[in-house]
Image (cartoon, helix red, strand yellow):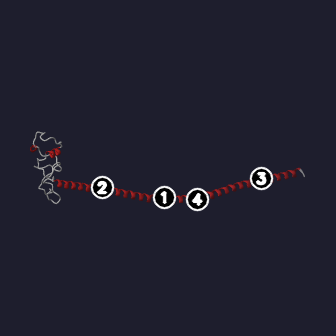
Amino acid sequence: MTREEFERIKEAEKEHLRAIRKLKQTVKSLERQKSVNDALTDLASTTGDLLDEHTALVEKLSEQTALQEARFEVAMESVEGEQSAAAQALKDEEELAKIEAARRQSRAQELVRKAKLQMGAVGADDVDGAGRDARSTDGGAERTIGRSAGDSAGNSDVGQRAVAGKTPGPAGASGASKADDPAPEKTIGRKRRQ
């Protein structure tokens, strides 16, 4: 083998090795590109799956939110209905209390009127609802505290003093006679007319 053949084989071998190296680099770059493409494809499919799952979860959450809002609105309507019913019941109770108070007042007035009739202290201008004179039928005799029905205007010094707020003392202690004592100042009902 001559030197020229040797150099030619050597150059051919170098070219061949360069070609193999180039092919290996190409293979490596293609493998790298393929792995990147595979990774991107996996990522895209995983992302797509995650996106689909996320979308499904968001839709489910939206449905649950709508259901909860509907339940809340129905509950609020029932609470508002209960509050309005409670307010109506309170108004009814207030009206009943007013009616009861008016009934008690009229009953009390009726009892006072009956007490006046029994004691004969109703004046000439006191007339019951039918327009009749409300005085008793004992001839218009008026009674006061401490005086009985049979006593006349000046016969009961003790009764007059009790009505006037005085305590009875010994007879003649005041220096005035029984006939000089004025009519009692206070009576049950209206003042006496003279």
Ranked by sequence position, the earlier of labels 4 and 2 is: 4
Closer mark to the observer between disc 3 and disc 2: 2
Residue type at the position of mark 2: Ala
Closer mark to the observer between disc 4 and disc 1: 1
In space, the residues marked 4 and 2 are separated at their CA atoms by 64 Å
In space, the residues marked 3 and 4 are separated at their CA atoms by 47 Å
Residue 187, disc:
none
Closer mark to the observer between disc 1 and disc 2: 2
Give whichever of 14, 121 is nearer the camera: 121
Q: Few, some or many C-alpha atoms within 10 Å of disc 4 (few <14, some 14-19, many ≥20)?
A: few
In space, the residues marked 3 and 1 are separated at their CA atoms by 68 Å
Ranked by sequence position, the earlier of labels 4 and 1 is: 4
Closer mark to the observer between disc 4 and disc 2: 2
Give whichever of 2, 83 is nearer the camera: 83
Provide residue 146's location: percent of width, then percent of height. 17, 48
Q: Which residue is mark 1?
A: 68
Residue 97, disc:
2
The kind of secondary structure element at disc 1 is helix
The kind of secondary structure element at disc 4 is helix
Q: Which residue is mark 4?
A: 53
- Pick out the residue farthest to the front: 170
Q: Residue at x 45, y 58 (%)?
A: 72
Closer mark to the observer between disc 3 and disc 1: 1
